[in-house]
Amino acid sequence: MNIIQMRRGMGQKPLPYDSRVEYIYSTGAQWVNLGEYFYSDTDVISLTFNPADTRHSGHTQGWLGSRQANASESILFLREWLTTGSLSKMSAADCVKNATETVSKRLSIDINIDINQVIISRLNKRFLMNGNIVAEKLNVDGGSFRSVYPMSIFRALSPAGGSVNDWAWATCHFYNFKWWRNGSIIFDLIPVRIGTTGYLYNQIDGRFFGDEVGTTPFVLGPDVR
């Protein structure tokens, strides 16, 4: 996992980065591994971003997630390009224990609106997008589960069998990501830069999360003054 430990200063600690930036932009060539598994019965996550109307490598962009190829132990937020050659606003979110969960009682949603924030909570049996409840299932099947892989951002799938699935890499402006467990926040990620390199900085424990690929840098937004 590409995590840079927080730099320490003498005396009063300076900021551990050169500047906070308004956003970092993923071009479809980067992804971040958070190294943490999602627990469906305790965890709630919130992602604030601006998705780009740009196709990348196939028909699907995954902004957040972890899953098996057979859709078990899935926690996903992605956009589907429904028609070859054209852009679509259809987005999907899933928090599903296994592929056999009753469709009418699985926590999932397809919705064709512009999205800037999504909150996913199987614990509360609902999705919220842009502050509105867009899916609420009071009788979710399947029970609790732990995601099969650690959660990643800018890509919906984690590595399987040592390989990286590259069909769901995402292009978007990233602003903030929060993750609660049992009501306590464990991730509060903001975009920052050290020099000209962008990172996600966790304000809770001081860790930096960088691009796992490392060949194409994130595009940086303007510094926050």
Image (cartoon, rainbow, N blue to C red):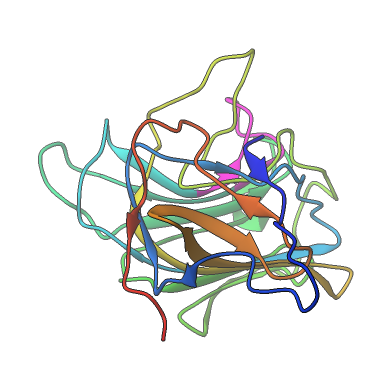
Q: Position of residue 182 (x, y in %)?
A: 89, 69
Vertical arrangement, residue 142 with respect to residue 20, above or below: above
**Residue 61 is inside the magenta segment:** no
Front residue (pair 168, 41): 168
Q: Position of residue 117 (x, y in %)?
A: 47, 73
Q: Position of residue 95 (x, y in %)?
A: 65, 52
Front residue (pair 161, 20): 20
Residue 221, can we see it? yes
**Residue 68 is inside the magenta segment:** yes
Specify the farthest residue to the left: 85
Quadrant into which the N terminus falls: top right
Q: Position of residue 148 (x, y in %)?
A: 74, 33
Tell me the residue at 16%/51% (across/down). Answer: 87
Front residue (pair 198, 131): 198
Image position of 48 (left or right of 119): left
Q: Which residues are magenta?
A: 64-75
Tell me the residue at 85%/62% (across/down). Answer: 42
Q: How many marks?
A: 0
Q: Quadrant of residue 116 in the image?
A: bottom left
Image position of 62 (left or right of 95): left
Tell me the residue at 38%/54% (across/down). Answer: 196
Specify the farthest residue to the right: 182
Quadrant into which the C terminus falls: bottom left
Residue 47, can we see it? no
Image position of 174 (left or right of 207): left
Q: Quadrant of residue 70 in the image?
A: top right
Image position of 112 (left or right of 12): left
